[in-house]
Structures are given as C-alpha cells and as structure tokens.
Image (cartoon, rainbow, N blue to C red):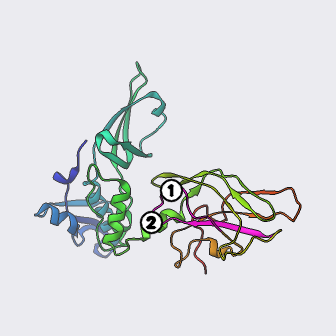
Amino acid sequence: MSNNATTGINTGIPKYRSPAHNWEMIDAEPVVNSTFLTEDGEEKRETWPCNFVTDEDQASQLVAYHIWDSRELAPITLVCMPRLRAYRPGECLHLDLPELGLDTTAIILRRELDPATMKVKLELMGETSAKHAYCLGLTGTAPPTPAIGQTAQERDELAAAANGDPNGFVETLIRTSNQGPVSITATHDEITVGDHDREYADKSVAVTGAVIDQDDEGDPLIPSTKYFLYYDDEDRAGGAVSWKVTTDFYDANQSPAAPYRHASGYIFTDSVGGGGTGGGGSTPPGTGGGEYKP
C-alpha cells in the first residue's frame, strides 16, 4: 500500500476533439491542482487525451479526476476470507483497519480467487468523496491530499472547511442519516422511545431512549394528539440525548435555525383511559434530519 503523492501529477493538459477545429485533437488550458503543486514544490505535468470528448469543460473535469486519482491511496492489496468473494471490481467498500492506518472508503480495481483456499485477493484504490465537487467545478479549492492514518470524515471535513463551509458536511451527514429499528409507545400523557442506533454515512452510534411527559414548550402532553420526536446532536455522539416532542412537523426537522436536528419519528398519544398506542419510524421523506422548512 502506498500514497501516490510521490508519483502523482499536479498539472494536466486536456486534449479533446474540438468541433471548432474540424474535429481535430487540440489542447485545452492546463488544469492545475494548486494544493498538490504547493505540496510538490514543482510542476509535475502530463498530457491526457480525451479521444471521444468534444466539450472543453468536460475534458478539463476528466483530467481533474485523473490528477486526483493519481494521489489516492493505492494500491491497497488485501487477502480476504471467502465470504468477500462476491464483491466485484467497481464496488466501493469501507476499510476500517487500524493496524494499517486505514479508515477510508475504497474502490475495488481487480480481484483474484485462489481455487485451493477460496480466499480472494482484492486490489483497491482509496476514494475521497470530497473530490467530486472539486473535479466537477462546483468548488474552487482542492480537497486535502489523502494520507494514511487520516479518516474519511477528517478528509471531507477538511475539504468542507477549505471551501468555506466547515459545518455543511456535518449537516449533510445528519440529513442523510438513518434511524435503526426503534420502539415508540405512548399513553395519554407519556411517550416512551426505546434505545436504538443512528446510522450515518461514516459511522453508527447508539442512542439512549427516554420517557417524555412534556412538549418542547414545557407543557404537559395532550391526549389524542400527534407528536413528532426529535433531538439535537451536533457532535453525532449519540448516548443520552435530550429528547423533545412537538406538534409542528417542521420544528422536528432540520432547518437553517436547527442544523443539527435529528428527526426521529412520530406517534399519537392515546385517549384518557385507553390501552396505549404504538408508533415508530422517521418522518418522510427522509430518515435523517428531514427537509428544510420552506
């Protein structure tokens, strides 16, 4: 396994087939990754032909990817047990191997099967998700160079900070998170939510349930009323979070005023003297932070 920074390039010359030049292959403006250029201390240039590309911007984006892929952690070679033989080239896995300093997503490039032992050898390349916005021209600052011992979350948070959006990455992780199976029950004046897991794109945390007997305004719960459950957890640490309920769907969901809000389902309180109600799940359309309030 190695970091390709010593062999990677920092400048690429896209060649594309130009309609304005009789479909000849011509050079576009150089694509320079300033982060890599600064790290290298010198220009490392390569010309990259995009034979079937007729758009200059697309050619530049493809060369930006070529530059970035030359810096990903690669090759990562792992010999795995037979249970991983179903994975194919092109699939993305998360590697959590502290002994190798790896906590990263990676793309399978090729695999080999040993017919005697049925073990599978996988060759992979690191995959930094923050590079896509940069390569497609959506941001103006390159993400940091991948390094052994750096987690996928750290890389993407550094990238978000470099692009002037230090909190946006965390908000996205919350908004796209999933709530594991959870028991939610209610009497006429109490709501009980059980322990469960919250699944983020980069990790899973255990969340402790609670008994709730008042709404987020501090008022007693009302019988036969629909309540939405939520909590705020900026650090995504889980544990004994501060559970709240509200009758307002939007207040229970993520918004600019509540960027770290976790939507966590809904339930109707029972009528007085009833036998209790059950509920669960998360409020649609998503299972994480929900949608911003319009």
Total residue callouts: 2
Q: Looking at the image, which is closer to me, 42 or 233?
A: 233
Q: Which part of the image, by quadrant, shows the N terminus?
A: top left
Residue type marked 2: Val
Q: Position of residue 161 (x, y in %)?
A: 33, 70
Residue 232 makes an appearance in the image: yes
Using a 10 Å C-alpha cutoff, classify the residue at mark 2 as few (fewer than 14 neighbours), some (14 to 19) or many (20 or more).
Answer: some
Element type where label 2 sits in the image: helix
Task: Find out whether residue 178 is within the magenta segment.
Answer: no
Q: Looking at the image, which is closer to me, 33 or 235?
A: 235
Q: Which part of the image, by quadrant, shows the C terminus?
A: bottom right
Q: Is residue 41 above or below residue 1?
A: below
Residue farthest toward the top in the current orientation of the protein: 116
Task: Find out whether residue 227 is within the magenta segment.
Answer: yes
Q: Position of residue 139 (x, y in %)?
A: 35, 73
Tell me the chief SS of the magenta region: loop
Residue type marked 1: Tyr
Q: Residue at x 35, y 72 (%)?
A: 137
Residue farthest toward the left in the current orientation of the protein: 42
Q: Is residue 201 left or right of residue 226?
A: left
Of the two numbered discs 2 and 1 on the same chain, state the one appearing first in sequence. 2
Q: Is residue 153 above or below residue 83?
A: below
Q: Are marks 2 and 1 in contact (CB under 8 Å)?
A: no
Question: How far separated are the C-alphas under marks 2 and 1?
Answer: 10 Å
Q: Residue at x 65, y 73 (%)?
A: 216
Q: Position of residue 151 (x, y in %)?
A: 34, 53
Determine which residue is flagged by label 2: 170
Q: Position of residue 197 (x, y in %)?
A: 57, 51
Residue farthest toward the bottom in the current orientation of the protein: 294
Determine which residue is flagged by label 1: 200
Give the magenta part as a residue range: 224-244
